[in-house]
Image (tube, helix red, strand yellow):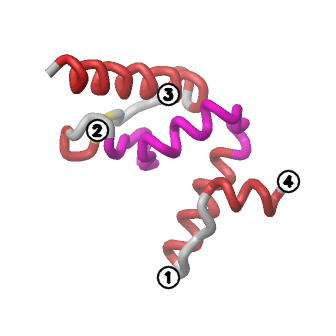
């Protein structure tokens, strides 16, 4: 189906732009979890869903802010707490 092919190609393109912006040449261990293109991407032991990547790119979230959020998200998760989503966290920290 052509629409699905376009979707998967778009997800791969988003992945490439996201990796280049946020990881540069230090990206390793890059894969779609479960080989499910367009769902969750693993990069350097971080995990990103497509909506997160699109939001970061669309709203030009800085590299520093993106990694600060991911560190916050991990810290909350390890403490058994639910983190704010990226949008609300950015509003609270700006």
- Find out whether the residues at labels 2 and 1 contact each other: C-beta distance under 8 Å: no
- In which quadrant of the rendered image does the C terminus lie? bottom right
Of badges 2 and 4, the one in the foreground is 4
Which one is earlier in the sequence, the residue at label 4 or at label 1?
1
Pointer 1: what residue?
A: 80
Find residue 19 and name its label. Answer: 3
- Find out whether the residues at labels 2 and 4 contact each other: C-beta distance under 8 Å: no
Find residue 93 and name its label. Answer: none
Indicate the quadrant where residue 24 lies.
top right
Pointer 4: what residue?
A: 94
| Side (left or right) of 31 relative to 76 | left
Residue shown at the point (63%, 55%) measured from the top left: 86
Which one is earlier in the sequence, the residue at label 2 or at label 3?
3
Identify the secondary structure beneath mark 3. helix
Indicate the quadrant where residue 70 lies.
bottom right
Identify the secondary structure beneath mark 1. loop
Gap in Å between the C-alphas at discs 2 and 1? 26 Å
Q: Would you say residue 62 sits in the magenta stretch?
A: yes
Which one is earlier in the sequence, the residue at label 1 or at label 3?
3
| Side (left or right) of 71 relative to 40 | right
Gap in Å between the C-alphas at discs 1 and 3? 29 Å
- Please tell me how crowded label 1 is: few (under 14), some (14-19), or many (20+) other residues with Cα within 10 Å: few
- Find out whether the residues at labels 2 and 3 contact each other: C-beta distance under 8 Å: no
Residue shown at the point (37%, 41%) measured from the top left: 41
Where residue 79 appears, as percent x and y from the top left, is 54, 80
Closer to us: 65 or 86: 86
Which one is earlier in the sequence, the residue at label 3 or at label 4?
3
Point out the stretch of residues depicted in magenta.
39-65
């Amino acid at each position: 189906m052509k629409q699905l092919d376009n979707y998967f190609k778009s997800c791969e393109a988003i992945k490439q732009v996201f990796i280049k912006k946020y990881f540069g040449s230090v990206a390793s261990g890059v894969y779609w979890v479960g080989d499910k293109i367009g769902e969750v991407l693993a990069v350097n032991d971080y995990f990103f869903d497509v909506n997160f990547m699109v939001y970061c790119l669309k709203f030009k979230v800085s590299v520093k802010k993106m990694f600060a959020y991911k560190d916050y998200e991990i810290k909350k998760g390890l403490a058994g707490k639910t983190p704010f989503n990226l949008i609300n966290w950015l509003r609270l920290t700006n």
